Amino acid sequence: MIVMKFGGSSVANAERIRSMADIVRQYMPRRPVLVLSAMGDTTDYLLEAADSALEMGIVSIHKIEEPHRKAIEELRLDVEITPLIEELKNLLLGVSMIKELTKKTKDYLVSFGERLSVRIASAYFKKIGVNAKPIDAWEAGFVSNNNYSQAWLLKESWELIPQRLIPLIEEGILPVVTGFIAKTKDGVITTLGRGGSDLTATVIAAACGAEEAQVWKDVDGILSGDPHIVPSAKPLSVITYEEAAELAYYGAQVLHPRAMQPCVKTGVPVLVKNSYNPSAPGTRIVSTVEKNAASKPVRAITTRKNVTMIDIASTRMMGQSGFLERVFAVFTRHDVSVDMVATSEVSVSVTLDTACNLDRIREDLLEIVHVDIKTGKAIITIIGDVERSSEILSRACGVCFDLGVQVQMISQGASKVNISFIVENTQAEDVVRGLHKEFFD
Ligand code: ASP
Ligand code: MG
């Protein structure tokens, strides 16, 4: 069996649903389980509708209902979505009346996107003679903790998922499973984080021992750089899980950052394909990639903007134990995750996502150290061959030097595939273009 996942733009309207189904039909002999995202930008529209209900007391679902109705009409489907639409309206009405929108309610709310898309897609499959069945993730065994908006799946999911899905495949059914969502043991709906359908797909593939997990996107695979910044960026034919995870984390919006974890455990390959260009080979993500003399030292370059750099200095750090522990305890207390770290004997620099309360963090840190918080920075990440790190560093620094860019902080792990450094937001794109030219052109 295989798992095939299609993202929002690959099921955005009647025409996209038709071409998605054409692709799936070709793979029917390999016995697919299908995982779908919400149609188009439905998830964003659901969040917008929630905000209008909360802030203005307005319940408006036109932007959500209309594209779904239109697709049903254009595809002439026999499917009833009114009960889900009514439930959604009632929920929004509730939000507008209580004037409260918790993370728990938000998860319930965004779940309608995926629940609608699997029902519509399944109806289309039926119409073209494929025996499909829409399945909400919890019926497929997805049990999570209650960390709303970023839920983690519980261990029992690994047993439940194959128990629920494999018998269906054996009966010749095409299961069409909602991506992104799950339920707690108590039956409350949760989500796995934005873009979480990738994770749904890789978990199913790993738990069922699938031959492969295919992730169908709107680009030709994982590229050597962001095509908006580097028009000449090329799709990579093969890349490791570790490299893909680093890329996802450091700003290449190709895959959900946690989506590689289930595959690392079991070694199921992931294939990233383009639903607009199915004949393109795509990118294969596997455990290890053979190197040869012709291999390039760098695989991909990415950037993430708007990060905050915190410079922490203490005269007392010299020779003191427990200093870093106290510094990091502050970040733990504020529930922010640190991305990069560089230390010397008397100072430590870290970077954080800007989406956190910097004033409160500053106050807490000031109790133990001198702090200097600098916002508006960008992380540049080079994913490459650690064994050629000196070559990569010297060429990368050469590029920055030629551009007149000061590298502000730099970090490279011992065995890791990633070299990251900080520059100003405004310089990030020039640096990425310069690096891409240096290493690929
Ligand atoms: N629909 C969700 C989102 O837009 C999940 C996904 O697309 O993977 O984030
Ligand atoms: Mg989406």
Image (cartoon, rainbow, N blue to C red):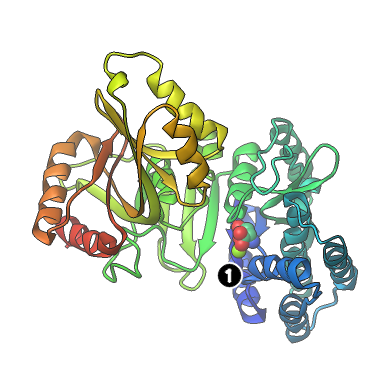
Is residue 256 shown above or below 14?
A: above
Q: Percent x, y for residue 116? A: 77, 67
Q: Amino acid at mark 1?
A: Ser
| 187 lies left or right of 436 | right
How many numbered discs, if any? Answer: 1
Ligand 2 is found in the corner quadrant, namely bottom right
Q: Position of residue 303 (x, y in %)?
A: 34, 55
Q: Quadrant of the C terminus?
A: bottom left
Most foreground residue, 223 or 122: 223
Q: Residue at x 76, y 41 (%)?
A: 141
Q: Is residue 80 visible?
A: no
**Residue depicted at x 72% and y 65%:** 113
Measured as percent of width and height from the top left, residue 151 is found at 67, 42
Above or below, comparing residue 259 to residue 433 in the picture: above
Q: Nearer the viewer, residue 350 or 31?
A: 350
Query: Residue placed at 78% from the left, 81% from the top?
Result: 69
Residue 263: give x, y in percent of width and height.
Answer: 52, 39
Which residue is under mark 1? 10
Q: In the image, what residue occupies the spot 79% across and 40% down?
A: 184
Q: Is residue 349 left or right of residue 284?
A: left
Q: Is residue 396 visible?
A: yes
Front one among 227 and 124: 227
Crowding at mark 1 (Cα within 10 Å: few <14, some 14-19, many 20+): many
Q: Quadrant of residue 390?
A: top left
